[in-house]
Every structure is written in structure tokens, then in C-alpha cells.
Image (spheres, grey):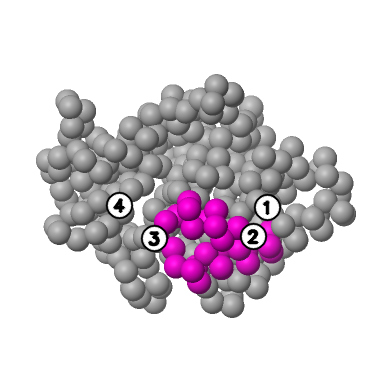
């Protein structure tokens, strides 16, 4: 299973000469090359294309593109759903908005994703991830997280919950968690995010009342939390561009307030050193 997921990417920047935050899921060399891969996704020649996923595996029926430029060949996932499909609202623009917001917050969990035309239509194009396994593989094959990685794995899970709470991603199933050889967590498929209904602007998806049992944001990095609190309509508009509407941006801010309120209550109850690191 390790070679059938998306991202053969090597990405990451040295932030103004400083070390990356410990919670960042990309390696330094991966972040340093992130903009390079964004440009590659936009401009590389499409040399092959197919739809490898069955409808039951991927409602949006994405295309796997093989891209080539300057002697480099990489795969990418292209999709362009927009509207209700199988009972869910889908939108390719939310894929790009999720990547840009992940990038702004410094999480580095979402593979490079840009807009690209294919068959004369606009859509999202995401670098294909070559991973060790999905979370589904991990559970189905009873693969244990190495003991020396458990601490960091759990912290990545708390960040995933915070991010999905912020973007109202109602569809984070186990195949959308990709696990690298060195047990970093990458997140894919965000075309069911950025909801604006009352259900997604008055309560969090992940908290004590999660339908499968408590799923808490137990510990969060201070840097991430401060970035989160600093979000406003102007910053979000600059970050996501045309890929979110004003209503969707307002929904993000409402969920930001819910997260901050939840974290502040937890700090009051447990102490800041137990919640932020």
C-alpha cells in the first residue's frame, strides 16, 4: 500500500534562517522546495492521465495525472467537483483553500495544491503522496506506532483535529490520513470542508461530544495557537484569495472563536503548561 498514495514530493523551507517549528510535518528540504512544486503543478506537461479510483472509493472521481518538466516526472491528483454529490456538497476550490490555510498556519500537513486546467476545465491539482500506509491500513493490519514515535504521533493527531475543526472538514475518514516511512502525518482530500451551516458554525466537530467518543485537541503548539488567534477577515482573504466566499471566511472565523473558547476553558481548568507547548 505504501506506493499507491499521493505525494512523491520533497518539500520545505528554512523559515528566514530559523529552525522549523517542532510540530511541522514536512521536512526542511520539503518546505524549501514547496514553491517549486507549486509551479511544477501549474506548468508541467501532462503526459498521461487516468482515473484509477472506483466511484465507491472516490465520489469525486479524480484524475491521476503524470506530469513532466525539465526531465522531472511526478504524479498529481486533479479534481473539479462543484455542487452536491452523493448527498454532500463538494468543491475543488476548498482543496486549494485548505492547502493555503495550512501553509499560513505553519502546519505543513497538506501536500502542495494549486489550480490547474484540465480538459478545458478549472480544478485543483495536488502533488501525489507516496506514503508508507494510510490510517486505515494501520488499523486493519494492527500496525503499532513505534514507542519512540507515540508522543509525536499523538501531537499530530491533536493538530489534525484543530485544523479540521477550523475548516469544518466533515469527511476525514481513515484513507485521508497518510503516514510516511518516518511516521509523519499528511492530510489529503478537503473538498467537503468550509461549511457555513449552523451545524458547523456553532459547535466543533472534534471535542468531548464527538460521535465516536471524545476526540480532543489536548495539546497545541503556542505558535500555532497564536497564529490561529490572529486570523481576521483581511488575513484570510489575502491567504485564500478567490477560493473562499465571504460567507465561508466568516464561517472560519466563527469556528476560530469556538476553538479559542474551548482552549481557554481547558487552560483555566488544567493550566496553560498542560495545554500549550
Whether pointer 2 and pointer 1 mark residues with C-beta atoms closer than 8 Å, the reply is yes
Q: Which residue in the structure is indicated by mark 1?
A: 229
Contact between marks 3 and 2 (CB within 8 A): the answer is no
Q: Tag 2's secondary structure? A: helix
- Dot 1 or dot 3: first in sequence order is 1
Q: Which secondary structure lies at badge 4? A: strand
Against 86, residue 63 (above or below) is: above
CA separation, marks 2 and 1?
Answer: 7 Å
Which residue, given by chain and number where applicable, does mark 2 sit on?
Answer: 256
Q: Which residue is mark 4?
A: 115
**Tags 1 and 3 in contact by the CB under 8 Å rule?**
no
Compare marks 4 and 3 and give the one earlier in the sequence. 4
Q: Residues within 10 Å of mark 1 (few under 14, many from 20)?
A: few
Residue 206 visible? The answer is no
| Marks 4/3: CA–CA distance | 11 Å
Q: Can residue 224 be seen in the rendering of this structure?
A: yes
Depth order, front residue of 121/60: 121
Q: Which residue carries the number 3 mark?
A: 242
**Residue 111 location (% of width, % of height):** 40, 42
Alpha-carbon distance for marks 4 and 2?
26 Å
The quadrant holding residue 269 is bottom right
Q: Quadrant of residue 56?
A: bottom left
The image position of residue 123, as x and y in percent, is 27, 57
Q: Nearer the viewer, residue 206 or 111?
A: 111
Which portion, as a residue range, is magenta? Answer: 232-259
* Label 1 to label 3: alpha-carbon separation: 22 Å
Label the magenta part by its dominant secondary structure: helix
- Determine whether, in the image, residue 196 is placed left or right of residue 268: left
- Badge 2 or badge 1: first in the primary sequence: 1
Q: Horizontal and vertical percent for residue 196?
A: 52, 73
**Residue situated furthest top in the rendering:** 17
- Residue drawn at x 27%, y 41% is 41
Amino acid at each position: 500500500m505504501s506506493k499507491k498514495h499521493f505525494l512523491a514530493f520533497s518539500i520545505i523551507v528554512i523559515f528566514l534562517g530559523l529552525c522549523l517549528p517542532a510540530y511541522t510535518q514536512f521536512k526542511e528540504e520539503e518546505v524549501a522546495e514547496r514553491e517549486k512544486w507549486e509551479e511544477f503543478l501549474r506548468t508541467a506537461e501532462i503526459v498521461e492521465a487516468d482515473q484509477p479510483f472506483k466511484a465507491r472509493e472516490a465520489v469525486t472521481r479524480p484524475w491521476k495525472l503524470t506530469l513532466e518538466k525539465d526531465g522531472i516526472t511526478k504524479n498529481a491528483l486533479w479534481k473539479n467537483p462543484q455542487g452536491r454529490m452523493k448527498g454532500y456538497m463538494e468543491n475543488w476550490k476548498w482543496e486549494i483553500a485548505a492547502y493555503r490555510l495550512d501553509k499560513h498556519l505553519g502546519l505543513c500537513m497538506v501536500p502542495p495544491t494549486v489550480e490547474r486546467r484540465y480538459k478545458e476545465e478549472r480544478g485543483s491539482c495536488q502533488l501525489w503522496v507516496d506514503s508508507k500506509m494510510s490510517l486505515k491500513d494501520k488499523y486493519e493490519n494492527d500496525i503499532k506506532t513505534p514507542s519512540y514515535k507515540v508522543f509525536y504521533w499523538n501531537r499530530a493527531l491533536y493538530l489534525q483535529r484543530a485544523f479540521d475543526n477550523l475548516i469544518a472538514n466533515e469527511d476525514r475518514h481513515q484513507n485521508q490520513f497518510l503516514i510516511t516511512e518516518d511516521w509523519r502525518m499528511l492530510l489529503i482530500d478537503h473538498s467537503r470542508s468550509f461549511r457555513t451551516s449552523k451545524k458547523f458554525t456553532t459547535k466543533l466537530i472534534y471535542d468531548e461530544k464527538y460521535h465516536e467518543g471524545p476526540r480532543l485537541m489536548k495539546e497545541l503548539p503556542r505558535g500555532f495557537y497564536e497564529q490561529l488567534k490572529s486570523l481576521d477577515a483581511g488575513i484570510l482573504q489575502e491567504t485564500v484569495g478567490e477560493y473562499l466566499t465571504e460567507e465561508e471566511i466568516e464561517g472560519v472565523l466563527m469556528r476560530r472563536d469556538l476553538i479559542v473558547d474551548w482552549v481557554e476553558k481547558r487552560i483555566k481548568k488544567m493550566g496553560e503548561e498542560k495545554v500549550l507547548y
